[in-house]
Image (cartoon, rainbow, N blue to C red):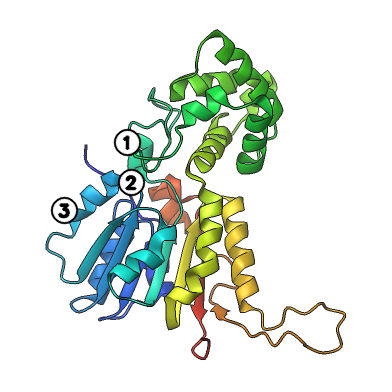
Amino acid sequence: MAYRHTPVLLSEALHYLHCRAGGTYVDCTLGGAGHARAISEAIAPDGMLVAIDQDPDAIRHAREVFRNASARVHLFHGNFVLLPEFLSQLNLAAVDGILMDLGISSHQIRSSGRGFSFDADEPLDMRMNPAGGTPAAVIVNESSERRLRDIFRKYGEERFAGRIARRIVAERRRAPIRTSRQLAGVVRAALPPAVRRRARIHPATRVFMALRIAVNDELASLERFLDRAVDLLNPGGRLCVISFHSLEDRIVKQRLRALARSCVCPPDLPQCCCGGRARVRILTPRVVRPTDAEVRGNPLARSARLRAAERLAGEA
């Protein structure tokens, strides 16, 4: 099936990456290659694009997209935390820009067959890379009630996490929960009727998001990557991150702010003793959001948030 995906905040991402002809850039989350294609065109003919994705469907699609690309394009199947290893394979120490789009692609929602959506009756898998990791069905059917509650509360910020976890445990005693539609029905039934009636989004939205995050270890991977990202940028190189929910955005915001601080001494000290210095300049003092026009054309963009920073020229 054709790989469908519309890149969000495309012009904004290109603006903050400040792509230049002949530069070397990384798209850490290739997806449908919308961002990657635009970057490769901006850096052609002598530039290099390194593109990464966990989903083998994305890599297969990208091979067709870049078959006749002017820029040099290197595709890697894996998690973006492996970027240092991928760059080493290309004999690169650092690059001029890194883009991360942390959202799930339209293809994964509509066409992957892995249970990312409650609108289809698909196997409850949710792995970005189906070759490894633990499927969502195993977590749903084998985790304790407490662990399920914690997943839904921590990763989905689900108000009724306890009720939903109890209902799942009760239902799986009768029969395993194996499909996305099954799970969505269980979640819906667990909520108070008044809450179901007033819901502006599908009642299972937060639970599905929480399970996907848990299955793919998304937040921990993001934190590990941000710990090393600045070291992978040339002086003046830029990091641009597009996130889609508050937990991701909070991690990115706090990490960039920490990197932009020159002093980390306790505030009650009369003078700086740490000798620290800022490593980046924040380019987005206020988070960048999609325009109303973009959201009308692509409703999946409505929760997108972009933050960007530049490695300081004198930082090493």
Read off the residue under disc 1.
112
User: Of label 3 and label 1, which has the lower sequence position?
Assistant: 3
Residue 64 is tagged as: 3
The image quadrant that residue 125 belongs to is top left
Question: Is 37 drawn above or below residue 199 in the view shown?
Answer: below
Residue indicated by mark 2:
55
Where does residue 50 sit, x and y in percent of width and height? 30, 66
Tell me the amino acid under the disc marked 2. Answer: Asp
Q: Earlier in the sequence, mark 2 or mark 3?
A: 2
As displayed, is residue 200 above or below residue 245? above
Callout 3 amino acid:
Glu
Q: Can you give x and y, in whole percent of width and height, for residue 299 in the image?
A: 44, 45
Q: Residue at x 34, y 35 (%)?
A: 110
Q: Mark 2–mark 1 contact, CB under 8 Å? A: yes
Q: CA distance from mark 2 to mark 1?
A: 10 Å
Q: Is residue 285 visible?
A: yes
Q: Nearer the viewer, mark 2 or mark 1?
A: 2
With respect to residue 27, does 200 lie above or below? Answer: above
Q: Name the residue rendered at 51%, 54% in the picture.
A: 221
Q: How far, Cα to Cα, is label 2 from label 3? A: 15 Å
